[in-house]
Amino acid sequence: MTRYAAPGGEGAIVSYESRYDHWIGGEYVPPAGGRYFENPSPVDGRAFTEVARGTAEDVERALDAAHAAAPGWGRTSPELRAQVLNRIADRMEASLEQLAVAESWENGKPVRETLAADIPLAIDHFRYFAGVLRAQEGSLSQLDEDTVAYHFHEPLGVVGQIIPWNFPILMAAWKLAPALAAGNAVVLKPAEQTPASVHVWLDLVCDLLPPGVVNIVNGFGVEAGKPLASSPRVAKIAFTGETTTGRLIMQYASENIKPVTLELGGKSPNIFFDDIWAADDELRDKALEGFTMFALNQGEVCTCPSRALIQRGCYGDFLEAAIARTERIVPGHPLDTDTMIGAQASNDQLQKILSYLDIGQQEGAKILTGGQRIEYDGELAGGFYVQPTIFEGDNRMRVFQEEIFGPVVAVTSFTDADDAIRTANDTLYGLGAGVWTRDANTAYRTGRAIQAGRVWTNCYHAYPAHAAFGGYKQSGIGREGHKMMLDHYQQTKNILCSYSPKKLGFF
C-alpha cells in the first residue's frame, strides 16, 4: 500500500497553484472579465485552487494566438512534429506519479487507476501518433499516360477541443495528440469541474511547443464552450461529453458548416453467455471482473457496462458470484493505492446518481447490493462517495435506458443469442458493449450484430491507441484513437495535373 499526500500538503509530490489563468500564446493571461471560480476536490469537497472564468473575449484572444501559430506549425516537418510529441511523452513518463496524483485529487478517482491506466494511456497516445505521423504518406494516381492525381494531407488549421471531467488528462491527450501530429493549432477548453490538472500537465511540457500552438481557455460551457464551438474561426470542433450537450455543439458548429467529432453518452450492454460458467477457471474469474468493471472510475465512463445481460442457464450462480465480487471492491481515500473506488467527480454528479437509486426502486427494480451514499468522518468528510450498486429489473426501466454515469449496473436475463441482441440494441445509444463466451462463433456473430462502435470480446475497458473508438446512433460521430484520427484533423488536397500540351478540343 502507498498513501500519497494531498497536493500541496506535507510530503506531497505535486502541488497546485493557488490560481490558474488562461494559457494563451505561450503565457498565462488573466480573464478579460476579471472573474474566477473555485475548484473543489471531490475527495473532501473543499476548494483547492481557483480558475479563470473565460468568456467569448478570452476565446477570441486564444483564437488570435492559434491563428498566428498555425501556419508555422503546419509547415513544420512531420519528423520535427513527431519529435515534439515523443518529448511530451518522455516528460509525462518522468512525472507519471505527479500527474496521477494531481488527476486523482481533482477528479476523485483512485490513484491506482491513474497510475496504471489514465496517465500511461495518455503517454502512449502521444507516442502512437508520433509514430503514425512518420508513416503517413500521400498518394499518386496515374489516370493516363499524361495525367496524374496527387493527394496531399494538409492540416485543418485551428481546431477547438472541449474536454470532459471524467478523464481530464487522458481525454485531452486523446484529442491533442492527433491534432498536433496533423499540424493544427488548438484552443482547448477543459471541463469546469476539472480544469486544473491539465495545467499541471501543461507546466511539464509547455516549453516544448511553439507559443500559440496549444491554448487553454478555462470556463463554463455557455460562457466559453459555446463561443468556441460557434466561432467561424475554428475549422473543427471535437467534443466528449453527454449527448444533450453534443446536440448543442453540433448545432453551433453547423452555423459555420464546421466538421465535428462527438464522443457522447452510452448505456453499454455486457453480455454473459452460459458457457462462461462451464468451467471454474481463469476465464470465469476474468468474466466476473468484467462484470464489476461498471465500478471502474466510479462508473463515470461513457462506455460503463451499466447493463449486464446474463443467460438464464447460469443466471443465479453467476449473479451470486458477481454480487460477491462487487462487495469486495474496496472504497476509501483516492490517494491510497489499495482503494478501488473513490469519489464521484462533483456533488452534482453524486446527487444525480442518488436520484437514480430512488428512481430504480420506484420503478420496481430490486437493489441486490449497495444503494447508499458513503459518508466518511475525518479527512474525507464532505467528499462525494457512493456504494457500488447492482439493480435487478428489466430493460424497459429508466435505470436500464438512461445514462446514470455512476457505479450502478442494471441486471436482467436472456434466453438465447437473438434475445440478447434484441435487448442489447434496445437503446438510444451505441458506444460500447461486452461479449463473454467460450464459443468463437457466438462471439463473432454477437459482436457483429450489436449496434455499437466498440465491442469488447472476453475483455472490457481496454483502450489501446491503435484501436478505433467511437459510437453508433446517439453515441456520437467520428472516432478517437487509431491512425484514422489523422484524417479527422486533416483535409485532402488534390492536385490534378496534365502533362500533355494538347487541348481537350471543346472550345
Image (spheres, rainbow, N blue to C red):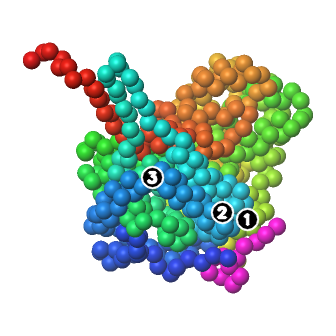
Residue that appears at 62% across and 52% down: 124
- State yes or no: residue 7 in magenta: yes
Residue found farthest to the left: 507
Which residue is disc 3 drawn over? 77
Is residue 468 positioned above or below 245 on the image? above
Residue that appears at 37% across and 44% down: 154
In the image, the segment drawn in magenta is: 1-12
Name the element at disc 1: loop
Identify which residue, 329 or 478, lies in the foreground. 478
- State yes or no: residue 353 in magenta: no
- Whichever of labels 3 and 1 marks the residue nearer the N terminus, that label is 3
Relative to 114, is 248 on the left or the right?
left
Circle nearer the viewer, 1 or 2: 2
Taking the image as drawn, is residue 372 in sight?
A: no
Q: Residues within 10 Å of mark 1 (few under 14, many from 20)?
A: many
Q: Residues within 10 Å of mark 2 (few under 14, many from 20)?
A: some
Gap in Å between the C-alphas at discs 3 and 2? 25 Å
Which residue is disc 1 drawn over? 332
The amino acid sitting under disc 1 is: Gly
Which residue is disc 2 drawn over? 93
Place of residue 280 in the rendered image (x, y in percent of width and height, measured from the top left): 90, 34
The amino acid sitting under disc 3 is: Ser
Q: Quadrant of the N terminus?
A: bottom right
Circle nearer the viewer, 3 or 1: 3
Place of residue 470 in the rendered image (x, y in percent of width and height, measured from the top left): 52, 39
Gap in Å between the C-alphas at discs 1 and 2? 27 Å
Is residue 140 positioned above or below 486 on the image? above
Q: Main secondary structure of the magenta part?
A: loop
Residue found farthest to the front: 501
Taking the image as drawn, is residue 378 in sight?
A: yes
Residue 364 location, quadrant: top right
Relative to 484, is 275 on the left or the right?
right
